[in-house]
Amino acid sequence: MKKLSAVLLIVFLVCAFSLAGNGSAYADKEVRFGILSALSGPASPWGIPNARVRVMDAERINENGGFKVKGETYKWKTFVYDHKYVPAEAVKALNRAIFQDKCNYIAIQGGAPTAACIPLLKQNNILSLNDEAGGKACTNPNNPLVFRYNPSVEGSYLTILTHLINKHGIKTVASINPDDETGRAGGAAAFEWVVTEAKLPIERISNEFFERGIKDFMPVLTRILAKNPDLIETGITDPVSQALVLKQARELGYKGHMLLIWGPNDEQVISIAGKMAEGAYLGVSGPREPSTDAAKELYQRFLKKFPASDWDANYYTHSTKISCLTQALEKAQTFDNKILADVLEDMEWQGMFGTHRWGGTKLFGIKRQMLNPVTVMTIKDGKAVLEFQKEVPRGILD
């Protein structure tokens, strides 16, 4: 009998470990979510808000009683790791999240960190919702559990470029991107794909790349200005670098249009560029001032934890990430990640400013890119004001 009991105990422990590593919940009804984000370094203006708001989302769900799967109530427990936007650090953090903290689901910031983590995610059958733009290297039919929860750079290009072409008659563009997987496959390639697929009447006459962390963009900008583009756009460049590009382009005498398309902090842009920020277009998650009931509720929740001076529009971006996964779990009524992914891809849900959905089949061969309303601000008289807010047109990226 003792021998049988020992065998049963070993079987139970092996099964429990296996289930935990495959996205299944624990017996104590706790589901663990690992957040790998840049809490330091140049990408931290994205990483800090994104990490904080996911934790806030989980707390809100827990305060409202959690969620039910097959009659059992579960609550979220979040774990946050600083990967500094360095791929090797992201892999270290993911190992800790999976094997030490036993996280069931993961969110990774950045295309290069996500690409480095995909082998480990696949080996452990982990479903992830990532803020990454690493192109097909990350998103393809061979990675069905890898979802891109960040706003679609393709959707942003499609919506914003169409607006600027119609408003200003833009015909030529210069792009600046970081020289890594995020910049090349995520930013530069996304621009080219959108222009070709949507048949936009513009030409990219300069396509430059820079090493992350540099502060002097004068050499890159000098090459660009020699070609006199109607528009300079900063692709998937970190917030601080976007502001520096804007400032230095104006210092060199550039008079054309500037588009900081990928989540800049408007106050940071104005602080760094000063009067030279005037007229720049900013692709952001939403207006700084909350304008919907959901956005106002998020802001009030934020103020209970952090000073008002820390608030920026990036908090909107991932404010419903864990809510989205929660809805999928309640609908699927299972922790089987294959079934969960099938349910998730067909979901539509409400974000801060409208409907969110999954698309990207034409681009990636699989429906794994979140499509959400695009917000653009412009700097006028030293302040960021709303230029427009539109949903991504259906049919081109779907």
Image (cartoon, helix red, strand yellow):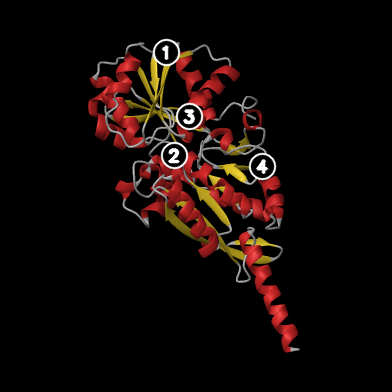
Identify the image quadrant of residue 8. Answer: bottom right
| Lateral position of residue 289 relative to residue 103, left or right | left
- Residue occupied by mark 3: 184
Q: Earlier in the sequence, mark 2 or mark 3?
A: 3
Residues at marks 2 and 1, CA–CA distance in whole angstroms: 28 Å
Circle 4 packing at 10 Å, graded few (<14), some (14-19), many (20+), is some
Residues at marks 1 and 3, CA–CA distance in whole angstroms: 27 Å
Circle 3 packing at 10 Å, graded few (<14), some (14-19), many (20+), is many
| Dots 4, 1 in contact, CB < 8 A | no
Residues at marks 3 and 4, CA–CA distance in whole angstroms: 26 Å
Residues at marks 2 and 3, CA–CA distance in whole angstroms: 35 Å
- Residue occupied by mark 4: 345
Tag 1's secondary structure?
A: helix
Residues at marks 2 and 4, CA–CA distance in whole angstroms: 28 Å
- Residue occupied by mark 1: 168
Residues at marks 4 and 1, CA–CA distance in whole angstroms: 37 Å
Residue type, label 4: Glu
Circle 2 packing at 10 Å, graded few (<14), some (14-19), many (20+), is few
Tag 3's secondary structure?
A: helix
* 2 vs 1, front mark: 1
Image quadrant where one finds the N terminus: bottom right
Q: Which mark is residue 384?
A: none
Q: Position of residue 42 (x, y in %)?
A: 34, 41
Q: Earlier in the sequence, mark 3 or mark 4?
A: 3
Circle 1 packing at 10 Å, graded few (<14), some (14-19), many (20+), is few
Tag 4's secondary structure?
A: helix
Q: Position of residue 49 (x, y in %)?
A: 40, 47
Residue type, label 2: Ser
x 61%, y 64%: residue:
74
Residue type, label 1: His
Q: Nearer the viewer, residue 346 or 298?
A: 346
Q: Which mark is residue 291?
A: 2
